[in-house]
């Protein structure tokens, strides 16, 4: 569900590669070390080609280059101990390039491609768009200019220029306006933060300007039985009961600084 968590393995893998490669290179004249080096290069080459083949229309020539360079580097690693220093270093460079070419290309493709949502995956675009773990399910909203301008106006007068359900919704409005937006209910609206009483106090103290009636997150408006808190749903209901809605840029918002409807 969350493939990007595997990045936590990177430091340990980097340490293992650094320590192991150094020890094997120092003992490259011995057959077991040379065989291990050759095997590592060959396995890395095969894995790179398999991963690149998953997007067969992206840089097809790169697989060929990696395959040829990797196999050549693996074969030469078997006799690395018999080569002179200059040739051995050249072989090492060939092996390193073959092993790192695919990860480097993936890194460049990932950094150069705009991603949306909370769970993007590495690699080139696929089927006309960035590779995503959950597609648009966790996308943050992109408000129109009118709403962005309304949120940014007098932002310094409020602790939060707006409150929105869930962190993904709040993130989109905060990034667009450049001002703090409260994420009601945490990640998907099922955390009891803030409570209805706390939110009412924030409104009374004029710390929140708008409430944004955005789309539902994974947990919907509040929680189902046993899955979390109903505080976010209670807040939404309280706002809708006591404040008049208005629409800016296609988005329904409530001005919490205006007198309540029943006052």
Image (cartoon, rainbow, N blue to C red):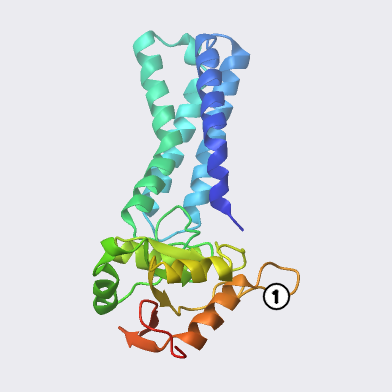
Residue 150 versus residue 128: which sits nearer the camera? 150
Residue 71 versus residue 173: which sits nearer the camera? 173
The image shows residue 257 at horizontal and vertical percentages of 36, 76
Residue in the picture at 42% in, 77% down: 212
Q: Is residue 113 above or below residue 79?
A: below
State which quarter of the image contains the C terminus. bottom left
Q: Is residue 232 above or below residue 191?
A: below
The image shows residue 94 at horizontal and vertical percentages of 39, 28
State whether residue 217 appears in this view: yes
- Where residue 117 sits, quadrant-wise, is bottom left
Residue in the picture at 41% in, 15% down: 88
Q: Which element carries disc 1, helix, strand or loop?
A: loop
The image shows residue 148 at horizontal and vertical percentages of 28, 72
The image shows residue 69 at horizontal and vertical percentages of 41, 35
Residue named by callout 1 = 224
- Where residue 181 sits, quadrant-wise, is bottom left
Residue in the picture at 43% in, 11% down: 83
């Amino acid at each position: 569900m969350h493939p990007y968590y595997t990045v936590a393995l990177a430091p340990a893998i980097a340490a293992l590669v650094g320590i192991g490669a150094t020890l094997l290179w120092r003992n490259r004249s011995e057959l077991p070390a040379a065989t291990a080096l050759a095997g590592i290069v060959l396995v890395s080459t095969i894995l790179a080609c398999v991963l690149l083949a998953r997007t067969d229309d992206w840089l097809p020539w790169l697989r060929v280059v990696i395959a040829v360079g990797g196999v050549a580097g693996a074969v030469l690693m078997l006799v690395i101990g018999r080569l002179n220093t200059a040739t051995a270093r050249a072989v090492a460079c060939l092996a390193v390039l073959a092993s790192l070419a695919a990860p480097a290309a993936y890194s460049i493709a990932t950094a150069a491609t705009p991603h949306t949502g909370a769970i993007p995956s590495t690699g080139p675009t696929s089927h006309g768009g960035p590779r995503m773990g959950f597609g648009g399910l966790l996308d943050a909203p992109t408000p129109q200019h009118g709403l962005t301008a309304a949120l940014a106006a007098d932002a310094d007068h409020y602790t939060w220029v707006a409150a929105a359900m869930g962190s993904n919704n709040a993130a989109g409005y905060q990034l667009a306006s450049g001002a703090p937006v409260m994420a009601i209910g945490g990640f998907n609206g099922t955390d009891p933060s803030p409570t209805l009483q706390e939110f009412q106090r924030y409104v009374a103290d004029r710390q929140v300007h708008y409430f944004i009636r955005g789309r539902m997150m994974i947990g919907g408006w509040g929680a189902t039985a046993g899955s979390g808190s109903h505080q976010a749903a209670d807040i939404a209901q309280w706002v809708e009961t006591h404040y008049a809605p208005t629409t800016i840029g296609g988005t329904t918002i409530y001005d919490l600084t205006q007198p309540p409807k029943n006052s």
